[in-house]
Amino acid sequence: MSDPAGPSPPTGNPDALPTRSPLPLSASQEAQVREIYHCNVRNKCADEVRDFAACATNRTFTAPFVCRAQRRAMNTCMLQFATQAEQDAAREEWFAKIDQRRKERELKEEKRKVQEKFHREWWGLDEQGRRIVDKGGKKDGDK
């Protein structure tokens, strides 16, 4: 007979769990979390990335051979910081900035509405985007 409370969580190391987030995210939200994660890892390995980029500049076919030491140093650094803990930190950062992103969206929407209102007034349009005609049969702006 199964447990009515559901399956028990695995005991042991909590870092072994896939994620500690209680909420599932959509694909676009997961992409935003991954972008934060990759940005954090690149920032921690900025010196190694810069060294590899400087070596690989103006090289095409020879870059993998000439810049092997810099590439290995960069990859070693990235693997060192590409951990589940770093992914969890990126997820927590994403959740911490929910309010900030909401405020940015609201400001963007307000700005869009102001610009739309200006556009309608400038061109003499009503709410549906049709030209406003005065009672004399002339369109707004005609003489």
Image (spheres, rainbow, N blue to C red):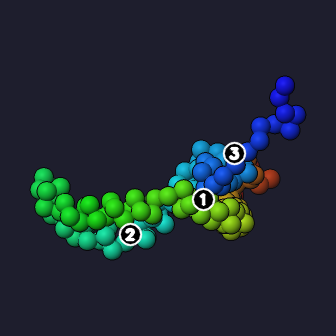
Tell me the crowding category of disc 2: few under 14, some 14 to 19, or many 20 or more residues within 10 angstroms, Cα based.
many
| 60 over 111 or under it: above or below | above
**What secondary structure is marked by label 3?**
loop
Instruction: Report the number of numbered marks.
Output: 3
Tell me the crowding category of disc 1: few under 14, some 14 to 19, or many 20 or more residues within 10 angstroms, Cα based.
some
* Label 2 or label 3, whichever comes before in sequence order: 3
Q: Nearer the viewer, mark 3 or mark 1?
A: 3
Image coords of residue 55 (percent x, y): 19, 68
Decide: marks 2, 3 in contact (CB < 8 A)?
Answer: no
Task: Identify the amino acid type marked 1.
Answer: Asp
Q: Nearer the viewer, residue 22 or 10?
A: 10
**Residue at which label 3 appears:** 10
* Label 2 or label 1, whichever comes before in sequence order: 2
Q: Nearer the viewer, residue 95 or 98?
A: 95
Question: Which quadrant is the C terminus positioned in?
Answer: bottom right
**What secondary structure is marked by label 2?**
loop
**Residue at which label 2 appears:** 45
Q: Nearer the viewer, residue 106 or 54?
A: 54
Compared across the picture, whether 5 is left or right of 28 comes to: right
For residue 68, which quarter of the picture? Answer: bottom left
Residue farthest top in this picture: 1
Disc marking residue 88: 1
* Label 3 or label 1, whichever comes before in sequence order: 3
Q: Is residue 123 visible?
A: no
Tell me the crowding category of disc 3: few under 14, some 14 to 19, or many 20 or more residues within 10 angstroms, Cα based.
few
